[in-house]
Image: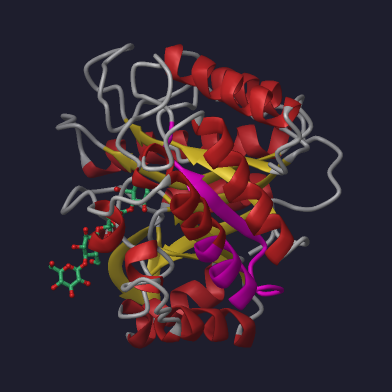
């Protein structure tokens, strides 16, 4: 794909990676993050189950070590994620509380967590994956939203308002997957963001997770885990949301290669092409500030042992994992590194 002309931008696009504290103990992994990335996201250490395992008991030590690593190495930090249907402690996922109690729990979680990290987190994924996959409306399995009852937009407004009060400088994001090109879910996502903004909810940022797949079976192959937009499609979607007056970010990029025939070189070239779509679209949209891949090297990926999912192979050269063609293609477009 040809890269559209770079927009005149106030800030460069940060290239980020999801990291885990456990893997950061490996000097090769650590050196790779320090040398090649601008920002980090905690893959799991800032989810509700990790941070508030019991009601009113907050456990920040692991997340604090990640933030300390970022500060020592000049990396920005994305906070992931305050409110999600996943990774909740059982006292939340099985909890039954009154609406007033749920409101207090939402306020307490957001203010304690965002307040604790105030000044250290550039962007927070305040609400993750709330849009129904078929675009029919909102999911009904998020305990924080559905426990609250009543109008789900009221619960969502509470989340963003509490986070904003706790750290007014943090960019507050809503985040979702398989919304990287036009389909009913993307339309529902757009309507939700527009309606929340119209209510004065302090949403600064919209995240597009970008868990993509190669279309090895030809265009239109469907996969609930992800899709693969063209450069034009992704640029168009990002610009449309940006025109609402928000920052846009690609927050969890990876590429699941369906059993594509072909040599490793052909697969790596296809992977680099997808990386150019992600980097090219973010670079072309002035309001796009972040391209984060959901991991560092292929064997880290949540997708299992798939190949070519991330920007680094598992081989090691000069004390870091080896950058793949997709990494260099990304840096060619974004600069930096
Ligand atoms: O740390 C425990 C370990 O002590 C225990 O022995 C082991 C077996 O139970 O589980 C370990 O925790 C696992 C954790 O990853 C750390 O490896 C959890 O079970 C497992 O559910 C968790 O999976 C994460 C998943 O989110 C659910 O939270 C994946 O690593 C993570 O990549 C994935 O990331 C999500 C984003 O947050 C949101 N978008 C989708 C993306 C992919 O699902």
- Residue 244 in percent (x, y) is at 75, 26
- Residue 296 in percent (x, y) is at 39, 63
Residue 38 vertical placement versus 25 (above, below): above
The quadrant in which the C terminus is found is: bottom right
The residue that appears at 33% across and 12% down in the rendered structure is 219
Residue 316 is left or right of residue 178, and the answer is left
Residue 27 is left or right of residue 281, and the answer is left
Can the viewer see residue 28 in this picture? yes
Q: Nearer the viewer, residue 31 or 64?
A: 64
Residue 315 is left or right of residue 153, and the answer is left
Tell me if residue 291 is in the magenta stretch: no
The residue that appears at 75% across and 53% down in the rendered structure is 12
Tell me if residue 117 is in the magenta stretch: yes
Q: Which residues are magenta?
A: 108-130
Can the viewer see residue 296 in this picture? no
Q: Ligand 1: which quarter?
A: bottom left
The quadrant in which the N terminus is found is: top right
């Amino acid at each position: 794909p040809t890269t559209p002309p770079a927009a005149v931008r106030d800030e460069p696009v940060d290239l980020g990676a999801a990291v885990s504290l456990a893997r950061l103990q490996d000097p090769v992994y650590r050196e790779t993050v320090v040398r090649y990335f601008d920002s980090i996201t905690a893959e799991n250490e800032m989810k509700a189950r990790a941070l508030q395992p019991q009601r009113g008991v907050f456990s920040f030590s692991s997340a604090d070590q990640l933030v300390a690593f970022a500060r020592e190495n000049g990396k920005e930090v994305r906070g992931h994620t305050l409110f999600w249907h996943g990774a909740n402690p059982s006292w939340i996922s099985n909890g039954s509380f009154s609406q007033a109690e749920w409101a207090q729990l939402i306020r307490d979680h957001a203010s304690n967590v965002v307040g604790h990290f105030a000044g250290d987190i550039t962007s927070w994924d305040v609400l993750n994956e709330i849009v129904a996959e078929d675009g029919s409306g909102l999911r009904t399995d998020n305990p924080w939203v559905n426990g609250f009852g009543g109008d789900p937009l009221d619960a969502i407004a509470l989340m963003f308002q509490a986070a904003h009060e706790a750290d007014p400088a943090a960019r507050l994001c809503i985040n979702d997957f398989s919304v990287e090109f036009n389909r009913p879910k993307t339309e529902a996502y757009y309507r939700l963001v527009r309606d929340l903004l119209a209510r004065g909810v302090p949403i600064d940022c919209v995240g597009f997770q970008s868990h993509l797949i190669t279309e090895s079976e030809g265009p239109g192959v469907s996969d609930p885990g992800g899709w693969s937009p063209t450069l034009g499609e992704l640029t168009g979607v990002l610009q449309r949301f940006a025109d609402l007056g928000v920052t846009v970010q690609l927050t969890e990029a990876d590429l699941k290669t369906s059993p594509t025939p072909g040599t490793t070189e052909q697969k790596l070239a296809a992977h680099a092409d997808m990386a150019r779509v992600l980097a090219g679209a973010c670079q072309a949209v002035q309001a796009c500030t972040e391209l984060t891949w959901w991991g560092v090297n292929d064997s880290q990926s949540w997708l299992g042992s798939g190949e070519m999912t991330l920007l680094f192979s598992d081989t090691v050269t000069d004390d870091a994992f080896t950058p793949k063609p997709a990494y260099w293609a990304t840096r060619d477009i974004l600069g930096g590194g």
